[in-house]
Image (cartoon, grey):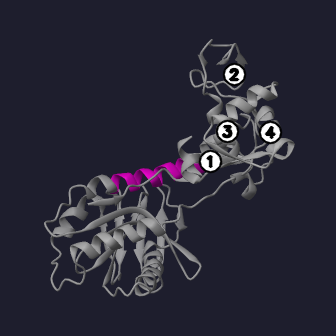
Amino acid sequence: MIYKQRTIPGKLQGLKALEKRLSTNHQELKSIQREIYNRRAGFGGEQHFDKKMTEFQPLYPHAILHGICLKQNGIFFEMDSILITPAFIIIFEAKNIGEKLILSSNPTQFIKVSSDGTRKGLTSPVAELERKAFHLIEWLLERKIKIPIRKVVAFAYSNELTVTDIKGTKIAFAYEIPAYLRTLTVDTPILTKIKIRNLANEMVRYHEEYNPFPILSTMKITSAEIETGVICPNCSRIGMQWLDQKWTCPPCKYTGKTEHQDAIKDWFMLINSKMTNRQFRYFTKMQDRNIATRLLAKSSLEMRGERRNSYYIMKDEKTLRDI
C-alpha cells in the first residue's frame, strides 16, 4: 500500500515561476533553464521509478512511501522511496542520468562520461544511501524499532553502466526492481501488519517538506529584476488588467476572475514570505486598495496585524502548492 505519493519539488516550481518573470536577455536565464531541465529530468526519473513500483504487489503486508524527508538529531535526510516489509526496510535512490556511468568504491566514485568523452565526477548515490541509512537507523531506534535496512540504487533508464566492487547496495535499472523485490524472502518477521501501518503513518506525520522559498534569498537576482504583473494563462503575456470585476488580457482578450492567484503564488515562491496590500497592488499592477483587500481575503491566505500594519502569509506550504 502506498502511504505517501511523490509531489513536485518546490525548487522546481520556484525556478519555473522565476523563468516566466525574467527578461529574455537576463544574464542568469540560461543557467536557470539548465537547472530546470536537470531538476525536471530528475523528477521524471523518480516518477518513472514510482510507476515501476506499482508492479510490485506482494501478498505480505507492506508500506511504500515516495519522497519522504525526516529529521534526526537536527539533520534532515530525504529518501527518494522506502519499502517497509515485515522483515526489513529498503531505501531507494532513484537516478535519471542519460550518459555512460561509472560507479565504483575504494575510492568511492560516480563518474558521468558524456558522448564527447568528457568525464564529470558526481556525488555517489551509494555514499548518499549509506548516510541516509545511518540516520534512518537512529530515527527508528528512538522509536524502539530495530530492523535490517537494505539499500537500492535504481537508474531510471537503461544506459551504459559500469559497476565495480560495490558491496551492500543493490544497483539496478528501474524496470528490474519489481522482479528483484519478488526474489527477496520475507522470513523471521519483525513488524506485524499493524506495526507496519503505524510506522508508515509515523513517517508521514514527521515528514518535513523541503521549503526553498523565497528562492531569491539564495540567488544573485534581486526583486527589482522580477517582472511584475498578472500572467495571462491563455497567451502567457504579463500584464492582465482588472476591468469590470475581472482580469482582462489586452492582446488576446482572455478574461477571468482568479488569475491573480498565480501572481500571489509567484510572490511567495520568489520574493518574500509575507505580502502586504501595497505589495499585492505593486506585484499585480492594481490601483484600487479596496479591490485588492477583497481579492486577498478570498485567496486562502492568513492575515496578521491590523489596519495599516496588516500583512498576509501562507497558512502552510500545502497552501502555497495548491493556491
> The residue under label 4 is which amino acid type?
Gln
Residue at 54% from the left image edge and 47% from the top image edge: 37
> Eyeballing the image, is 60 above or below 57?
below
Is residue 309 in view from this perspective? Answer: yes
Report the Cα–Cα distance between label 3 and label 1: 12 Å
- Residue 323 position, x and y percent, is 57, 40
- Residue 230 position, x and y percent, is 69, 28
> Eyeballing the image, is 191 above or below 259?
below
> Eyeballing the image, is 216 above or below 117?
above
Q: Nearer the viewer, mark 4 or mark 2?
A: 4
Q: Quadrant of residue 121?
A: bottom right
Q: In the rendered structure, are the residues bearing label 1 and label 2 in contact, judged by CB atoms less than 8 Å apart?
A: no
Q: Which residues are magenta?
A: 35-49
Magenta stretch holds residue 46? yes
> The residue under label 1 is which amino acid type?
Gly
Residue tagged 2: 240
Report the Cα–Cα distance between label 3 and label 4: 10 Å
Q: Nearer the viewer, mark 3 or mark 1?
A: 3
Mark 2, secondary structure of its residue: loop
- Depth check: give the residue in front, 285 or 162: 285
Name which of mark 3 and mark 1 comes first in the sequence: 1
- Residue 91 position, x and y percent, is 36, 72
